Amino acid sequence: MCMAMVGTLLCIAAATVVSAQADRTWERSFTSAVDDAHSQARVTVSRIAYGERMLLRVDVDPLDGELPLPPGLGRWPASGEVILSPAAEELRSTAAFRALAPGRVAGTVGDAGLRSPDELVIYRGVPASEQPRGGEGVVAPGATGAGAHDRDTPDIPPGQVAALVTVLAVLVGLPVAAFLGVATRLSAATRARRLAVLQFLGASTSTIRSVNMLEVTTLSFIGWLGGVAVFPVVNRVVARSGLLGTTWFASDTELTAATAILPGVLLLTLAVVIGRRIETGTGTRAEIRQADPARTVSAWRLVPLACGLTSLSAQVVTGALRPPGVTPVRLDLLMSTAVVVTAAGLAVAMPSVIRWSGRVLAVHGKTVSARLGGARAAFDPRDGARLVVALALLVMAAGVTIGQTRDARAVSVPTAAVVPVAVDVSELPDGGAATLLDELPTAAIGLAASDPASPEMRLAAIAPCDRVDAFLRAVGGASVPGCVDGAVLTSSIDEDPSSVRVDDVPAIASLAENLPHRGVLPENVAGLLAESGVDLLVTIDPAAVLDAVARGPVVTEAGGTAYATNVQLVTAVPSADVAATLASIYRTAPYSQPTATGLDPDSGRNIAMINGFVRLGLLLGTVMTVLALAVALADRATTRRRPDMSLLAAGVDASTLRAAHRWESLTTLGTGASLALLCGVLGGLAWQYAGGLVREPDWASIAVLAALTVAAVVGVAVTTAAMAPRDVDIESLRTT
């Protein structure tokens, strides 16, 4: 009960974290000024990818100092100074990070100004004259001239938070309910003797139910008190652990009267309801089972499972056979439906599966103990299903999560060994393109596109032959046959290469109009130079083209700020060198926004939190499942004690009896867990193939899950055998 309470409180804390971080973001974010006359400071807020994390950098000129300080700051940084969060200060020793935050360290951002302890935040003192377009004018919230108050960091949408809380409630609530049910129904045999005494003394059925309810409720109340006492320690540990895909300040999730009392009320209510649902009678469950014949289990129970597995298998085969690079057909709804149907079918079909496997072992077992264990499993498959269904659903959920996690991670971090990194040339300072072409660790090329208003899109790659070959070796090992510097090659991706002209791309028109045409660029090479393929390759020094592009932002008709994005500098680097490459670009162009294909820390943060919610649910569900199994095994040992004694008294060897218990557990748990593992792996692969970003299954995680499943099944079997009696106890043979 204590674990159930701690799990419930952690679920509440998980939901509170998102809200608390959103509040912290709102408090520190700036309010725009409607015009420059009302500005109390000039700021430039940048969000910069650093590895798999996002850095928030605020360049500020406080002007006359009237703007109130944001939370966590004791003063504004002077020009040339930086104030860092503790996590950013730890990274200050790396050259790549220093390039993002040049200046003299003048202080530390306090906890009140951070979303989480490991957030990367930098406040820099930068005069307005050095900020792009003088920076953005900001004022105090509610002051004269105040405009929009925009968050500096995106948060998980409320609807998604509600869905995650629901997932947590299901993953934790069902095992808790199963544990209470096991503690009252499966353990009824343990307390049946005590309740039978009350019945023999004349107590009514209502009184017996009330006694049982009081016992369960008392245990739940003690568990609630223990959970409330233990939670503050657990909260501090989990808050810094990153279990939820993020860290948080433990003060944000401290217990309140509401969060402590409400779960307790719900837990006690559940205990009352389940505690009153007890079978009463003068006989024990063991006697009832002996009198009852094996109940029929309908084969129709297998239909939902068969439908779900068929759908998942078809999706996995289709995904595995899909050619590389082909975008998958979006089957998210079908995949999700198949996973849900399979999970429901697994629970419904479990008695049928256990009965079938038990019968097979009872008929074909090589030893007496194997046949006895199989017969016992097949005799009451519903009882065995109650024992295994929680573990089976947990194994399946873990298997699906492996594929979901692998697919989700591919959304936010590069999965390829070589990662294209690009920056818009209009964001570079004068001469910046030539500087980067010399400084970047790997070969870089220019990409220039036709005017966005042009009716037909054209894309040209610009680089001399040696640079093109070096770039191609980095991304795929191809080369340009017969390449000659100072020439134009048109791509074979166009139906009529002769229709492609250099003046279709304004950035190269003046420099390439008199260059000779030297052949056709192979389609595979054109596809490696750009994701969508290039129409032209112009083999000249790209610096001449790139440094001629107009610099700086322009004001759109709507009054917004925009940069020209039709000319880029592109390089391809090993995934381990992405951070260093981005740092080189930031050193040259501090206010640029370079991109690395597949790198999206904001999405990664949200996805990590989503996966964290799932991991927390699985962890707590595992704990409750283990507790339910332990209670169920203790109950089974009690209910089987009298039949076991009868067998021992009849001359059955104790080792044979223990082996029969092992075979029964292996048949019941092994069959259910193996089937659940298959369902989980298929569900995870279907999820992964539906996403389409990563084709290779996570075999290492699947192997770990399989090993843990085998360990759980073997552990239960060994424990069950160890609990079997070794000697005849005459008292146990007496009728109660």
Image (tube, grey):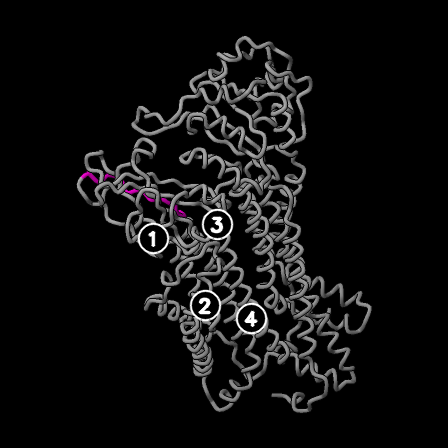
Q: Position of residue 469 (x, y in %)?
A: 64, 25
Q: Earlier in the sequence, mark 1 or mark 4?
A: 1
- Labels 2, 1: front one: 1
Type of amino acid under label 3: Ser
Residue 352 in view: no
Q: Which residue is mark 2?
A: 234
Residue interval drawn in magenta: 145-157
Contact between labelled residues 3 and 4, with CB atoms less than 8 Å apart = no
**Residue 616 to residue 601: above or below:** below
Q: In the current view of this chain or complex, which residue is farthest to the left? A: 144
Disc 1 marks which amino acid? Gly
Q: CA distance from mark 2 to mark 3?
A: 33 Å
Of the numbered discs 3 and 1, the one sitting upstream in the chain is 3
| Amino acid on which disc 4 is placed | Ala
Q: Residue at x 59, y 14 (%)?
A: 486
Residue density around tag 2, few if under 14, some if 14–19, many if 20 or more, within 10 Å? some
Q: Which residue is mark 4?
A: 628
Q: Secondary structure at mark 4?
A: helix
Are discs 3 and 1 less than 8 Å apart at CB? no
**Which mark identifies residue 113?**
1
Q: Tell me which corner region of the image, top left, top right, bottom left or bottom right, holds residue 368.
A: bottom right
Q: Earlier in the sequence, mark 4 or mark 3?
A: 3
Residue that mark 3 sits on: 93
399 left or right of 567 in image: right
- x and y percent of residue 403 in the render? 59, 48
